């Protein structure tokens, strides 16, 4: 594991600096990939960066499927909660400097609340290959029935999987929105043959949130009606 940068985030004048400090090249590359995926979904995407503890940063983005996506990397951000344009952040991540310049602050562009860090109840694990198969079938249906505006809402809202806890006390439906968000953000390998047979995704819930954790990141969906995250 790459050790996080231990600098104090201050300039020579003693003023606190604004920016992002990935702990190392792997963390920078992870964030660059996350940001690139966000831009593919929306060229005007806004990425929210939040500190988690002293040495981790969580990147958040709205995927366009009414689903939030997040990726955790080692590093620091100052201030501890900031939003930036994905395009500006992408440029900062490719610059050969330790400090990443995230561009003009866009905190007012982020709407809605984020899910909590803790408290999620583990329901069960699902084979990653099952998710990829659902994504492939969903993509085929989207090509057949979609429009210039994307897949129909009826397809996105369809619960394509029901996950139940051992004993059946708790269960939750997984909508196609979450499956599409997982694959669109690259949180699962794009080809089934690249996924080990024993690789899983983990399904967790809170009363107001559905969370799915995959190899490269997590997606979150508001539960309930109207179940729109950014409102």
Image (spheres, helix red, strand yellow):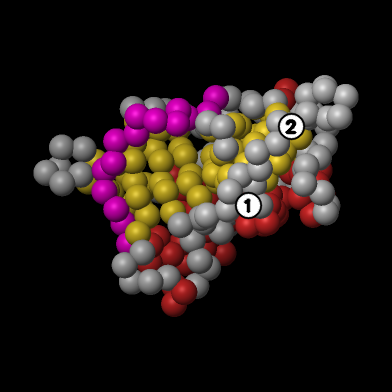
The numbered disc on residue 9 is 2
Tell me the residue at 34%/34% (across/down).
120
Q: Nearer the viewer, residue 30 or 148?
A: 30
Q: The C terminus lies in which quarter of the figure?
A: top right
On screen, 121 above or below 145? above
The answer to whether residue 93 is left or right of residue 203 is right
Number of the front mark, 1 or 2: 2
On screen, 26 above or below 189? above
> Are there few (<14), some (14-19), or many (20+) residues within 10 Å of tag 1?
some
The numbered disc on residue 7 is none
Quarter where residue 132 is shown: bottom left
The answer to if 7 sits in the magenta stretch is no
Q: Position of residue 36 (x, y in %)?
A: 70, 54
Q: How many marks?
A: 2
Q: Nearer the viewer, residue 148 or 184?
A: 184
Residue furthest to the bottom in view is: 193
Q: Nearer the viewer, residue 85 or 111?
A: 85
Tell me the residue at 55%/25% (across/down).
113
Q: Is residue 194 visible?
A: yes
> Are there few (<14), some (14-19), or many (20+) residues within 10 Å of tag 2?
some
Tag 2 secondary structure: loop
Q: Position of residue 165 (x, y in %)?
A: 20, 44
Tag 1 secondary structure: helix
Q: Which residue is mark 1?
A: 27
Mark 1 or 2 closer to N-term? 2
Quarter where residue 145 is shown: bottom right
Tell me the residue at 58%/48% (across/down).
3
Residue bounds of the magenta highlight: 113-127
Q: Is residue 41 visible?
A: no
Tell me the residue at 73%/23% (across/down).
108
The answer to if 116 sits in the magenta stretch is yes
């Amino acid at each position: 594991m790459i050790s996080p940068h231990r600098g104090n985030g201050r300039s020579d004048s003693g003023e606190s600096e604004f920016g992002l400090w990935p702990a190392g090249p792997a963390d920078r590359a992870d964030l660059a990939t996350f940001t690139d995926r966000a831009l593919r979904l929306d060229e005007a995407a806004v990425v929210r960066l939040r500190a988690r503890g002293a040495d981790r940063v969580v990147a958040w983005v709205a995927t366009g499927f009414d689903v939030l996506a997040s990726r955790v990397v080692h590093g620091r951000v100052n201030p501890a909660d900031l939003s930036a344009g994905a395009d500006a952040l992408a440029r900062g991540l490719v610059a050969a400097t330790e400090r990443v310049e995230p561009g003009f602050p866009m905190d007012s562009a982020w709407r809605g609340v984020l899910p909590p860090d803790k408290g999620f109840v583990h329901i069960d694990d699902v084979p990653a290959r099952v998710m990829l198969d659902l994504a492939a079938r969903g993509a085929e249906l989207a090509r057949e029935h979609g429009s210039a505006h994307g897949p129909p809402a009826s397809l996105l809202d369809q619960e394509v999987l029901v996950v139940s806890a051992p004993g059946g006390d708790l269960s939750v439906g997984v909508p196609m929105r979450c499956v599409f968000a997982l694959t669109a953000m690259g949180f699962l390998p794009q080809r089934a043959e690249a996924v080990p047979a024993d690789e899983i995704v983990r399904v967790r819930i809170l009363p107001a949130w559905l969370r799915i954790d995959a190899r490269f990141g997590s997606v979150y969906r508001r539960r309930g009606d109207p179940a729109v995250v950014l409102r």
